[in-house]
Every structure is written in C-alpha cells, then in structure tokens.
Amino acid sequence: MRHQVMSTARDQFDMPVILFGILALAGAILVAAFCNYLYDMQFASTAISLVIPLMTIALGLVALISPQWEIQPFGKDFIDGQLIGAVALVFGMVMILTAVAVAVSTRMGQVMTLTMCTLVLLVGLVSDNLFGQNRDTHLLARLGYWISPNLAFLWVTDALTQEHHITLGYVGTAFGYAMLLVLAWLLIGVALFQKRELG
C-alpha cells in the first residue's frame, strides 16, 4: 500500500518496504532450508511458521520508518480505517474459501478440494463479467449469477490504490454477505456429511 504502483520511471522506490520484505522472506526461506537439511524438519511448514512473524516484524518496521529512512508516527502512511476494512473483507473471502474446503472435503479428496476452492475463487472474482452482463437476457447467465458467489464485493484493492473511500456501511454489508456464504457452504457440508460412511 505504501509503495504503490510505479506509473513512471521517475517514481522512487520505497526502499524500507523492499528491503524489510525481502529480508523477512529470505530469512524465513534460509532458516527453513537449514532446519530441513540439518534437523529433517518439513520445509514448507517451517517456512510458513517463520515467514508470518518475520513479515509482521517487517510490517512494523515499515510502519515506523518513512521512505526517507526517518522515524515517523506508527503507521502514518498506510494504517487507517481503509486498510483495516480491506483486511476484514479479504478475511471474509478467506473464510468463504475455508467453508468451501470443509464442505467439498466431506466427499472429495485433497486435489479435488483444492481444485474446487480455486474454481470458486476464480468464478467468484469474475462473476459480474462472466454472468452479470447478460443476466437480464439469458436464463443460464441469470442462474450462474445467482448461484456463483460474487467475491468481487470483497476484493477492494482497486478502491484502495485509486484512493476511493471504503465506508463502514459497505464493509459491514459485504462482510455480512460473506458470512451468509460461509453459513451456506457449511450447511452444504453438514448435509453432505450426513450420509457419508465412516471407517
């Protein structure tokens, strides 16, 4: 958010963002590789376990240090209600995909569960373009628009980068929509699990 998109060649890099982010990621990968080689620890889970706290530290340092390498008030450049609202909406999207994974995994294996989650994410992000434009003229487009989750409501990065205001009412409404989708997918999962044979 602070680095933003560089639209011209004369735009300056935000070196604290780049340096702290690369150091956190490289440090996690190197330590995970070291632990995998010497202690036979799982690389992926070790790397994820390390990258989360290291990236959090990097974010804290970026919030304290300005692009000119000066101490500034914490989060002056990018931590505000807009970013918190966007994080809440993305969290709602993650919860939807988690509910999809739980529901689908009651009947399918790991690969098909991941495939269905990816499909729901991709169709959900483009459902307006895929179905919404023709929903008034075609029955299949109308059905697809009503059945597919519209995750574009939760993906507000364009609004953030173009400095459009994200209201609290919008965040509440979109998050409520996300929770209804979560409830629907979990109820589908319960229904699918009812007749499943165990053992």
Image: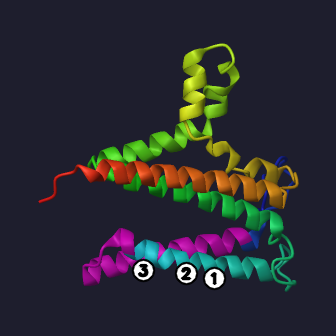
> Which residue corresponds to mark 3?
31
- Dominant secondary-structure state across the stretch colored magenta: helix
- Eyeballing the image, is 10 above or below 1? above
Residue type for callout 1: Ile
Which region is colored magenta? 17-45
Q: Is residue 11 above or below residue 55?
A: above
What's the amino acid at mark 3? Answer: Val
- Distance, label 3 to label 2, CA atoms, is 13 Å
Q: Are marks 3 and 2 in contact (CB under 8 Å)?
A: no
Callout 1 touching callout 3 (CB < 8 Å)? no
Magenta stretch encompasses residue 89 = no
18 sits left or right of 179 in the view:
right
What residue does disc 2 label? Answer: 53
Quadrant of residue 59 in the image?
bottom right
Q: Which disc, if any, is residue 124?
A: none
Q: CA distance from mark 1 to mark 3?
A: 16 Å
Residue 32 position, x and y percent, is 39, 76
Residue plotted at (66% across, 19% down): 134
Vertical side of 142 occupied by 60: above or below: below
**C-alpha distance separating marks 1 and 2:** 6 Å
- Residue that carries the numbered disc 1 in the rendered image: 57
- Image coords of residue 173 (percent x, y): 73, 54
Which label's residue is closer to the chain start, 3 or 2? 3
Q: Mark 1 falls on what kind of element?
A: helix
- Mark 1–mark 2 CB contact (< 8 Å): yes
Report the side of 111 relative to 116 (left or right). Answer: left
